[in-house]
Amino acid sequence: MTQKFPDGFLWGTATAAHQVEGGNTASDLWLMEMMKDSLFAEPSGDACDHYHLYPSDIALLKALGFGVYRFSIEWARVEPEEGFFSQAALDHYRRMIAACLANGIVPMVTFHHFTAPLWFTRDGGWEDAKSVDRFARYCERAGQALGDLIAYACTINEANIPIMVTMIREAVGVAGSGRREAALAEAARLCGGLPGRFAPYLSGNGHATAPNLIAAHRKSYEVLKPLVRGDVGITLSLNEFQAEPGGEGLRDMADHAINGQFLESLKGDDFIGVQTYTRVRFTKDGVRPPRDGVELTQMNYEFYPEALEACIRQAATVSHCPVIVTENGIGTEDDSRRIEYTRRALQGCLRAIADGIDLRGYIHWSMLDNFEWLEGYRPKFGLIEVDRATQLRNPKPSAYWLGGVARRNEI
C-alpha cells in the first residue's frame, strides 16, 4: 500500500564538515587524532575531500532525487584564531551554499557540529561561560556573510550530547577514564594550555556545558534570526527512553537531564531537529544492554527504527515546535538492512503525521561513508560509498531507493 507524505515535505541527507572535508587542521580534534596515544581509531586526514569535491557531490544528490542538503560550516576554518575571521573560508561556504541553490537543493546549514577551534577548546571550551558570547560572535559574523542564502539554520548539533556522554561515563564507572584524562592532559600540553582547561565537546564535563549550550543557542538564535532568510532551530540527540518494572525513576531522571531541559528551552523556535538512532532501556539497576540475539548495528546500537516515532512525538509535545528529522540512519555493511531500517522509520513518521504532529521533513544520516569520530572510518552510515584511495563515489541501493521515495513523496 502506498503512503503519501504531505506536500512540501523535505527530503534530504546530511554530512558534518570535519567528517567529510579533510584537513581541518585548526580544530581541536585534529590535534587529538594526531597524538601518539590517541583515543581515536585513526585520524580523519583527507576524509572524503568534500571541501574540494562538494560541487559533484551536490550534483549527485540532485540526480538521486534529494531536495535538501544539511551540512555544517566549520568554526575552526572561519575563526582559526580568536577574533580573526577568514574571508576565504566564508567565501568557500558561500560558494557551497550557492552550489546547492544552483542545483535546486535547499541548503540547511549547521553552525557547530562537534568540532571547535583549538583556541576555544584550549581555553575551557563549552565549560567556560565565555563560550556563549564567543559562539554568538561567530554566528553573527557567519550569518552576515551567508545568511541571505540559508533556508534553514541549525545553531548547534546535538547540544544535549555532552551531558548524555557524561552520564553514560558516570553510569559505567571509571573504566577507561584514566586514559581519557591522560589524553586531555597531553592535548593541553601540546597546545600550550593549562591542565584541566582543555575541554572538547564530546570529552568534557556535560553537567558544566549544558547551561552554556542552552544559553548559547538562545543567544545565537536571536543573532541569526534577522540574518537568515529562512528558519532557525537546533538539533538534539534523542533516544527513546523506556523503563522495565522498577526502572521508571532512573528513566525519568535521565529523560529530564538529557532530553527535557533542552526541549523545554526551545519554545518559540522555528523548528526542532530530531536525531534518533535507537532506544535505551532502564532497569532499577541502570541501563539494560540489548538482549542476546538482538540485531546490533556497527555502533553496537540495537536495531530499533521505531524509536524515531516516539522521539518525534516527545519533541513536538514538549517543545511545541514544528519538527524536522535532521538525522536518522544506521551504521551497517549490509545495505539491505539500511533500507529496512529507513522504511520502518518512515512508517513511524507517517503515523506521527496522521496523528497531527507537525513533521516537516526527513534528513537521512549520512550522505557519504565518512569519519565516525572515535570509531574512525569503520562504521558505514553512508548512502554513498567512498573509495578513499581514489575518492570515487558509488551510490548504494539505499541511495536509489530513498531518492525514489523522495521523488514520489511516498512509500
Image (cartoon, helix red, strand yellow):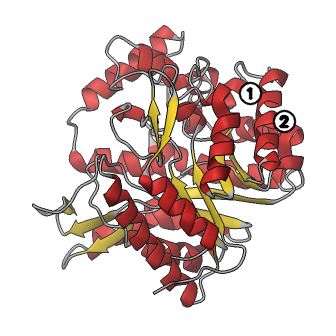
Hey, what amino acid is under mark 1? Val
Q: Residues within 10 Å of mark 2 (few under 14, many from 20)?
A: some
Q: Is residue 329 left or right of residue 48?
A: left
Q: CA distance from mark 1 to mark 2?
A: 9 Å
Q: Position of residue 271 (x, y in %)?
A: 68, 67
Front residue (pair 105, 173): 105
> Within the image, what quadrant is residue 280 found in?
bottom left
User: Image point 58% across, 49% down: which residue?
Assistant: 14
Q: Position of residue 156 (x, y in %)?
A: 63, 48
User: Image point 73% across, 25% down: which residue?
Assistant: 79
- Furthest-left residue in view? 292
Q: Residue 186's mark?
A: none
Q: Residue 141's mark?
A: 2
User: Image point 35% across, 49% down: which residue?
Assistant: 331
* Label 1 or label 2, whichever comes before in sequence order: 1
Hey, what amino acid is under mark 2? Arg
Q: Quadrant of the N terminus?
A: bottom left
User: Image point 84% across, 56% down: which residue?
Assistant: 225
Q: Is residue 299 left or right of residue 382?
A: left
Q: Position of residue 123 (x, y in %)?
A: 59, 24
Q: Is residue 246 above or below residue 211?
A: below
Q: Which residue is mark 1?
A: 78
Front residue (pair 194, 108): 108
> Within the image, what quadrant is residue 71 found in?
top right
Local SS, label 1: helix
Q: Position of residue 291 (x, y in %)?
A: 13, 63
Q: Residues within 10 Å of mark 1 (few under 14, many from 20)?
A: many
